[in-house]
Image (cartoon, rainbow, N blue to C red):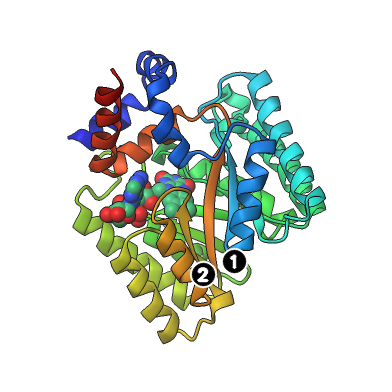
Amino acid sequence: MLRTGLLAASRSPQLRNLVEHTPLAQPLVTRFVAGTGVNEVLPTVADLRADGLAVTLDHLGEDTHDHNAVEATVSAYEDLLAALAEAGLADGAEVSVKLSAVGQFLGDDGERIALDGARRICEAARAAGTTVTLDMEDHTTTDSTLGILTALRADFPWVGVALQAYLHRTEADCAALATAGSRVRLCKGAYAEPASVAFQSKDEVDRSYVRCLRVLMAGAGYPMIASHDPRLIAIADSLAAKYGRAADDHEFQMLHGVRPDEQRRLAARGATMRVYVPYGHDWYGYFMRRLAERPANVGFFLRSLATRS
Ligand SMILES: Cc1cc2nc3c(=O)[nH]c(=O)nc-3n(C[C@H](O)[C@H](O)[C@H](O)COP(=O)(O)OP(=O)(O)OC[C@H]3O[C@@H](n4cnc5c(N)ncnc54)[C@H](O)[C@@H]3O)c2cc1C
């Protein structure tokens, strides 16, 4: 119930206005978000790289219905990628892109606009010497996102995509994408989805995750295991051993601010460990999904409000 309420709140403009203007949200926001601009996020990237962690950077923003905002997002990624290259950080630091932030919802032309924007970001990534992964948003966007992925991969075969284990369709999507050179980030899924398209219980989602992971590990692509769940990480290790995958043949991914000690433990034992690092002003939707994932975060947030009021 709490999860559903928070996910509904993540799309409410009224609540967005309230939470964004509460300075009291800042301490918890800064746990998950690494700053507002490139100058703030680059030192975080440098620290993570120095600790042996790879990075994927997300310029926050989603559900854009405005051409100027789309242009601003694409330019922000171009600037970020140029800055990463200039700082010597592009090796091991890629970017994650939400297609809804680059125009996917801009009317009948949305897909073309999103493809054009994503293409510009891929060109900037290629010039910097790094890669791009497409985030996956709610299930109404899955077909469109996979279509844009196919178009991008014709020119940029290293573009990756996130797939969500909670969707009934995902095992089949994993099979279709488990091909040579294909980078697939497998996550549980972070949006409120109906029972017609998604598993609803944690057990069902976890079981689906394992089925999908088995398909990816057995296939010819490059699996990216995006989870903080210790049981799934242990299963990923045993599947990697079973299918003879070396440490550079798959990777683990976790979110900035979540289980940082475990991130370093995995990197120290020789695993490829990538941290998803969001930055920017538009943190509300991302932040609310992080609250929804873990009720303890809500308690922490409310306690910080109570002790400061
Ligand atoms: C790198 C990365 C990229 C992602 N990209 C996408 C995407 O493109 N699309 C999408 O729908 N979802 C994405 N997600 C989110 C994902 O779908 C899940 O919602 C999220 O990772 C929580 O699931 P979990 O596998 O960690 O397992 P859970 O069972 O939710 O969590 C396992 C344990 O991890 C810890 N934990 C998990 N989440 C939090 C949190 N927010 N705060 C504190 N502790 C926490 C807790 O200890 C928890 O018990 C991504 C996640 C990661 C790590």
Residue occupying image coordinates x 22% and y 57%: 204
Residue 54 visible from this viewpoint: yes
Quarter holding residue 47: bottom right
Q: In the rendered image, which quarter contains the C terminus?
A: top left
Residue occupying image coordinates x 59% and y 75%: 248
Q: Report, in whole angstroms, how far the alpha carbon at label 1 lies from the one at label 2.
A: 6 Å
How many residues crowd around disc 2 within 10 Å: few (fewer than 14), some, or many (20 or more)? some
Mark 1 or mark 2: whose residue is earlier in sequence? 1
Q: Is label 2's Cβ within 8 Å of ligand 1?
A: no
Quarter holding residue 116: top right
Using residue 35 as the reference point, say whether residue 195 is left or right of it: left
Q: Secondary structure at mark 2?
A: helix
Look at label 1 and name its amino acid: Gly
Q: Where does residue 93 sit, x and y in percent of width and height?
A: 66, 55
Look at label 2 and name its amino acid: Ala
Q: Where does residue 190 sit, x and y in percent of width and height?
A: 36, 43
Considering depth in this image, is 28 or 63 the residue closer to the camera?
28
User: Contact (CB < 8 A) between labels 1 and 2?
Assistant: yes
Residue occupying image coordinates x 63% and y 41%: 41
Q: Where does residue 209 sit, x and y in percent of width and height?
A: 33, 62
Q: In the rendered image, which quarter contains the N terminus?
A: top left
Query: Residue 75, labelled with which disc?
Result: none
Q: Is label 1's Cβ within 8 Å of ligand 1?
A: no
Query: Residue 52, labelled with which disc?
Result: 1
Q: Where does residue 136 sit, x and y in percent of width and height?
A: 48, 45
Residue occupying image coordinates x 50% and y 38%: 33
Query: Residue 267, labelled with which disc?
Result: 2
